[in-house]
Image: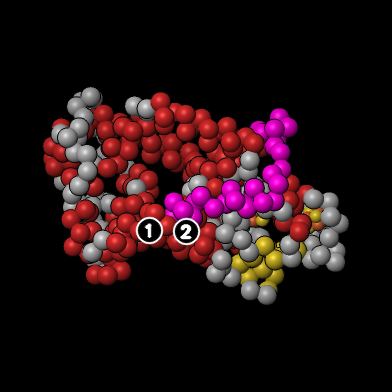
Amino acid sequence: MPRHLHHICQLVFFLALVVVGVQFIAYVFWALNLSPTFVPRPPCVEAFLPISALMALKRFLCTGLWDHIHPAGLVIFCLALILAFLRKAFCGYLCPFGALQEVLFCFGSKLGLVRPLPKWIGRIALMPKYVLLAFFLAIPISLTVPEIEEFLLSPYNLVCDTKLALFFLKPSTLLLAVLALLLLGSLFFPSFWCRSFCPYGALVGLLALFSPFAIVRDPQSCLHCHKCSASCPQGIQVENFVRVNFPECTGCLECVHNCPKPNIIKLKFGVRSVSPVILPILVVSLTLIIYIIARLTNHWETVVPLEMAKMLHEHIEQISHF
Ligand code: SF4
Ligand code: SF4
């Protein structure tokens, strides 16, 4: 059971996301007058609005004011940053895209599609996500707090979740091609999107470098069987390192569980060995605690009245930018 905690977490959050997705689409259909049935908008969809959350975070840091337009988005963004101190655990345990890519890579491995990249190409392939991260960070950094407040209160920000849903519900040929490329790439390369392109993962991964948790291998006892490296969903060659402290390591602990002998690879907190179950337990507990606090303190539900949301949806085609 402990060795499957990582997969159980991924499955639970993936299924939860499917429910949230279906509920949100039903809400969008109601808001656009395509269905008479009202379905409440699930606040969790705000997890897919990281630029809005970045803006709201800068405003919060500068003024102490929480964003009440997409409050859950800011909560989830802060949760991802906090979980970085548990080794980029947001990506490894909660993110549905991470889970999907692990499944695809598993299929790719079973079909014999996986080919190791030359080291230098592998290193270059890690870079695009940092370029994207720099681009997205530059947006809130370059804006003043009043400009950010103008954005947060703009009609565009109020309906950007629906805009995003329509972007995927009515996909362009380019979007379909990009999605197909990402899905295909995930069959051939471990965590293709996360490792190479995800700016969210890049930010969380950089913070994870300061995590007190790390995977540590004992080179003296190692059998060099390659099982740790082969099982790593991030493609890290665990077997070549004593301490794995890379931005890509999600703390999934597959390397620990797949090592044939106990105590060769361990999870360490600082210099102390700790039980591998601690990490998933901390991830789930912290996620639930933060979620419950956000709900109890009114930092979860948007304050945008339903009538206003409905009115904005009637003009959604005209709302293109703020
Ligand atoms: S190094 Fe180990 S804990 Fe880190 S991502 Fe790879 S398998 Fe998971
Ligand atoms: S799985 Fe364990 S024994 Fe095998 S190479 Fe990795 S650390 Fe060494």
Q: Which mark is residue 18?
A: none
Residue under the point 53% across and 43% down: 193
Asked if residue 113 is among those painted magenta in the image, a careful observer would answer: yes
> What colour scheme has been applied to the protein in the rendered image?
secondary structure
Q: CA distance from mark 1 to mark 2?
A: 9 Å
Task: Kindly tell me whether mark 1's CB lies below 8 Å from ligand 1.
Answer: no
Of tags 1 and 2, the one toward the viewer is 1
Majority secondary structure of magenta residues:
helix
Q: What span is colored magenta in the figure?
A: 107-133
Look at label 1 and name its amino acid. Answer: Leu
Q: x%, y% of residue 206?
A: 52, 62
- Can residue 179 be seen? yes
- Within the displayed image, which quadrant is ligand 2 positioned in? bottom right
Q: Is residue 53 above or below residue 165?
A: below
Residue under the point 28% across and 37% down: 163
Q: x%, y% of residue 49?
A: 34, 48
Instruction: Report which residue position mark 2 lands on.
Output: 203
Label 2 secondary element: helix
Look at label 2 and name its amino acid. Answer: Leu
Q: x%, y% of residue 121?
A: 64, 48
Q: Which mark is residue 137?
A: 1
* Position of residue 304 in the picture relative to residue 262 (left or right): left
From the viewer's side, name the closer residue of 129 and 93: 129
Label 1 secondary element: helix
- Can residue 285 be seen? no
Cβ atoms at labels 1 and 2 below 8 Å apart:
yes
